[in-house]
Image: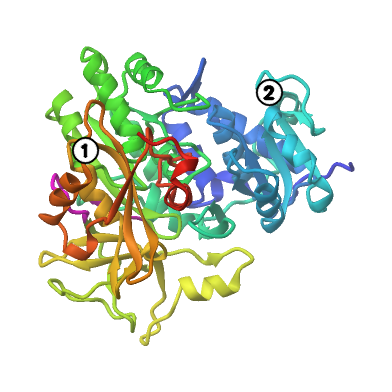
Amino acid sequence: MTEMRCTEPGPSGSGGLSLPALLEAVAGAVPERTAVVAGERRISFAELDRRATRVARHLCAAGVRPGEHVAILAFNRAEWLESAFGAWRAGTVPINVNYRYVAAELRHVLADSDAVALIAERSLTGPVAGITADLPKLRHVVLLDDGSGAAPLAGVDYETALARAGAGSRGLPRTSGDDLYLLYTGGTTGYPKGVMWRQEDLFRVALERRRPGSPRAAGPGELGARAARARGRAMLVLGPLMHAAGQWNALAMLFSGQTVVLNTDRAFDPRRAVALADREGVQMVQCVGDAMARPFAQRLLAEPHRCAGLHVLSSGGTPLSPAVRELWRAWRPTAALNDSYGGSETGVCGASGAEGDTRRFTMGASVSVLDEALRPLPPGSEQIGRIARTGRIPLGYYNDPATTERTFPVDADGRRWVMSGDFGTVAEDGSVVLLGRGSAVINTGGEKVYPEEVESVLKSHPGISDTIVVPAPDERLGQRVTAVVSPAPGSSPTDEQLRDFCRTRLAGFKVPRRFHRVEEVKRTAVGKQDYRWAAAVVRDPASVAER
């Protein structure tokens, strides 16, 4: 391949609120502070910034031009963050790729994103090697060593590439807050879609952490000054960097001058996760709902001497159930349990610290619940509407104008919204009560039931460990509410006991007609409900071992 170098003028630090400029500012302010802990590696902010610059220089030398896309296929590791920042610093666009994808899904993401380069762990390149004929734009591969030996896909070794790239940002392209941030997000149906953000907008709505009432950072210099003043703290990021929750929490910590401790295990192991949090003295843990928070709390209760400094649990993607909150309170009554509401298309919209079994969130001023005409519903309205955000929102979906038009409508006043996909109501105090995804709504006898509302009630039952609620066919009602549940250890509530519990908290039509018991409720890689699996259980209970 003929080498070419980026020749656009200007240092990367001239990029205003671009993500690489923000990292550079923080690294300049706290160069020796630990930025990332990943396995045995401990990387300072200065080293993270230097290595990201070497990634950028390599991409430029390999002929990857500003604006082109670089896919990252890897488990949690320091090189994931180095590669992402390096791609942004080169003026290119990193693409997150789910390491659980099979060949067809990989083909879609790599082709749909127009990826010209791939940075991947050697052991994950097998499926890609079999589809390269379908990826004519992919012309450069960088391989991350993961101890697996030879890779099925040819490419340059990551450390060799960085060693040859040289240091310094001279000659790298000028970056800008207008540069693209592209996040591929999987939906409940169909192939993943790429959500396009301006980097400055994403920073403002998802990555900037500041004290209540304090002004927003005017630029990178001010962000660096804040990092220098900040007390050093650490967060254990349990979620994968390939998804928004893990990635955004990691970036927000870095831009605050704080330490990110990555869970580098290939599968979540609560015993090892607690040991890691204890060893690194973390003050915060990021998780995705009960699937991570419950076993983590149970491990803490079994080893109460661990994690003396841990006082904040942050969950996003799916709310914590009352039962799991009680576990954390039993371990440490003073712990702050923070649920955040948001998504790949909306950024972080609001937060909840509620202890009840309602899914109530305090939202920012740019978030509303809209009626059919895209008009915000007033507080106290009994009408169900669609949760949406305006203001700093994405540009749309990459390569998908039709879905962009549906998801980002414009109201009668010319105001552009992004629809979250969730439905809710507005309480008297202006908070939003989350009902659930419209795509998963159950229509039973003409009444609409939002599965997540029923799941929240069931998970508050002391005899239920986890649950997913899905529709089942019904000749009379069209669909009936059905729950797949995993009982808590030592518990075996009957169907009627569960129905009686639900009837005191839900309208009769929302109460599940049938319960399917399983050893463990299956969830996705980031802890969200796997509705497809649950629907299969309901269709063919014999295919899953029940108890």
Residue where numbered disc 2 is placed: 145
Residue 475 x/y as whole percent: 38, 70
| Front residue (pair 150, 222) | 150
Q: Residue furthest bottom?
A: 412
Q: Is residue 172 left or right of residue 471?
A: right
Rate crowding at label 1 as few (under 14), some (14 to 19) or many (20 or more) other CA atoms within 10 Å. some
Q: Residue furthest right?
A: 2
Return the x and y of residue 413 as percentages of the image width and height.
36, 86
- Residue 502, image x, y percentages: 16, 52
Indicate left or right for 99 with 68 as reference.
left
For the residue marked with disc 1, what is the amino acid?
A: Leu
Determine the image quadrant of residue 314.
top left
Instruction: Say whether disc 1 or disc 2 marks the residue closer to the N-terminus.
Output: 2
Q: Quadrant of the C terminus?
A: top left
Q: From the top left corner, tell me how far across and down residue 72 is, in percent.
A: 63, 40
- Regarding mark 1 in the picture, which secondary structure is present there? strand
Q: Which stretch is magenta?
A: 348-360
Q: Secondary structure at mark 2?
A: loop
The disc at residue 162 is none
Q: Which residue is mark 1?
A: 337
Residue found at x 57% / y 34% = 80
Q: CA distance from mark 1 to mark 2?
A: 37 Å
Can residue 295 be seen in this snapshot? Answer: yes
Q: Is residue 222 left or right of residue 492?
A: right
On screen, 202 above or below 284?
Answer: below
**Residue under the point 80% across and 52% down:** 134
Q: Is residue 354 magenta?
A: yes
94 shown above or below 188: above
| The N terminus - image quarter | top right
Q: Is residue 210 left or right of residue 189?
A: left
- Amino acid on which disc 2 is placed: Asp
Relative to 100, residue 384 above or below: below
